[in-house]
Image (cartoon, coloured by chain):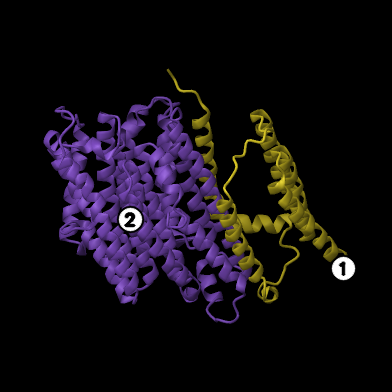
Amino acid sequence: MITTYLFYLLSFLAIMFGSMVVLSKNPVHSVLYLVLTFFTIAGHYVLLNAQFLAAVHVIVYAGAIMVLFLFVIMLLNLNKETEPHKSIWLKASAAVASGSLLVVLVGSLKGASTIQSINAFNPNIGLIENLGTTLFRDFLLPFEVSSILLLAAMVGAVMLGKKSIK
Amino acid sequence: MKALILLSSLGVISLLAEIFSFKKLLYPLVLLGLTVAFVLNIGEWNTNVTYFKMMQFDNYAVAFTSLIIVVAFLWFLMAEGFFKDETNQTDHYSLVLFALVGAVLMVSYTNMTMLFLGIEILSIPMYILAGSKKGDIQSNEAAFKYLIMGAFATGFLLFGITLVYGSTGSFNLEEIKNAVSVPGTVPSIFYVGVLLMLVGMSFKVSAAPFHFWAPDVYQGAPTMITAFMATIVKTAAMAAFLRLFDDTFHRVEATWAHVLWIMTALTLLTGNITAVFQTTTKRMLAYSSVAHAGYMLLALLAANGYSSSSILFYTLAYSIGSIATFCIISIVANAKGDDGIHSFNGLAKTNPLLAGVMTIALLSLAGIPPTAGFFAKYFIFTSAFMAGNVGLVLIAILASLIGVYYYFRIIIAMYFKEKASEEEIQVDMNHKLLLIVVAFAIIALGLFPDAVIRLL
């Protein structure tokens, strides 16, 4: 029972912080709200009995990546409000388009309860042993292939960062 | 799979070239590697091997992989100058090769995770290479726009994959197909997942209304990278799109067919009509590449036995046509310092070879016989006609008539406009050879289309 209440609390907080990321004017505040959103999602992982994922999520996303983000934003000194004014038509069309998307997404939740019968939840799925088995047996090829993705991203970052030889 | 491993190792080897100082050897090494990869890949024809339930090298995958490798080979012949930059030489090689790895993954996946990884491995080197002219503000803009918009589209794609996974319990295409085989038991979030994936894939093939990034990115990126995007990226994205929607999601066609119908019509019309008003050739070709995505969507929408063979032929015809046009545009733009249509004035008098090949390539892009482009369009229209999309075929024919108008603007400029200067543009020997080979290929494909069309 307590987990149900916790789930609703965490979901509410996640949505609230998520909206605050978009709504706050100051980019530094946005990043801090994003960190809080990541924490609430880590809470969801704990509720699903996936403690390892929760820990990794907090360390990698909330810890490493967001702190880097914060440093970059502070170095760029984006505190001034420099956002250009957008025309009323642009705003209206954006509101209509994203509103329609919202209606479709919310409407699709109708009948979502049938999903539970298709995939029964296995409470042990998030434990580190099962995670490892899935990763290194079923998803071995994607796991290896993602090394190419990371290498390509790294090479690209170095290429963009280095000074040209004169 | 062997081609995939070879391409990945070539990418890693080219990174080592800096340390072990064999940078001079890298260019022939890459060309040799691509040739070997092509041969190894052909060896997998008719074997139909599945690897780890993640990739399947059926004839479809082998045919598209071969096409990608052939086009990449031609691209390397064209883009030797792009790798002259001393500082980033090895990085450029490895990024391009890694992008090819992504392209091969995208044509052979049987699992959503591989689709996602393939798209990302192709996209991330493209974001970076679009901005590889670091001092040029337009190149920076192109990279930034491509990255932001691409990441947004990837978000849609991932959300779609999540919803499909949530409702079927699998990433495997075959299992998803079986899970949705009984209508009525499919939860509605599955359909939303399909539509979100449609949005993500449409962005990657630059179909309207998700094409807004294409003109700016194509114009700002270095011309060689634009050529890569127009040929290899488009081929891979189209093949991935087709594999997903004509096979896995075919049973839920009612969900996406109407949406795609409207998008195809929009893509054909906006691409062709906007291209008419462009003054620079690169931007015009960007809009024309949007329009070509529209023609290919026509066959995708048809979803019948002709779709894959007609798209294979179309991507081949379009890719080699684009290689020729972009090669000539970069030569002319380098000599005149401007890629506006007026730079081509009187080119037929000073450089008859360039003008001749450009004419053949443009005629092929416009779809005029006896070039490859004519049969490419013919097969696409036949496929759409068989599926009963007569209205859409009429729109496409109308759109290609508009296409003829703007392709002919360059041809008219080359043959009938007064030339600005008497100077002949110097063309490298290997560029000349490449252009002659490509021109012959365009004509040969137009005369003997059966050789390719019978493959699938």
**Numbered mark located on residue B272 in the image:** 2
Q: Residue furthest top?
A: A166
For label 2, the crowd category at 10 Å Cα-Cα, with few meaning under 14, some 14 to 19 and many 20 or more, is many
In the picture, the quarter occupied by the N terminus of chain B is: bottom left
Relative placement, left or right, of A107 versus B441 is right
Question: In the rendered picture of this protein, how many numbered marks are placed on residues?
Answer: 2
Residue in the picture at 53% in, 40% down: A153
Circle on res. A1? 1
Which image quadrant is residue B330 in?
Answer: top left
Q: Amino acid at mark 2?
A: Asn
Residue B47 in sight? no
Supply the letter of whichever chain is yellow: A
Chain letter belonging to callout 1: A
Viewed as shown, does residue B31 lie left or right of B156? left
**Depth check, front residue: B218 or B20:** B218
> Looking at the colours in the rendered structure, which chain would you say is drawn in purple?
B
x%, y% of residue B72? 33, 45
Callout 1 and callout 2 share a chain? no
Of residues B20 and A119, which is closer to you in this image? A119
Quadrant hosting residue B452: bottom left
- Does dot 1 land on a helix, a strand or a loop? loop
Query: To which quarter of the image does residue B113 belong?
Result: bottom right
Classify A13 as above or below B380: above
> Is A116 positioned to the left or the right of B13 in the image?
right
User: Which one is in front, B209 or B27?
Assistant: B209
The amino acid beneath tag 1 is Met
Image: B116 above or below B186: above
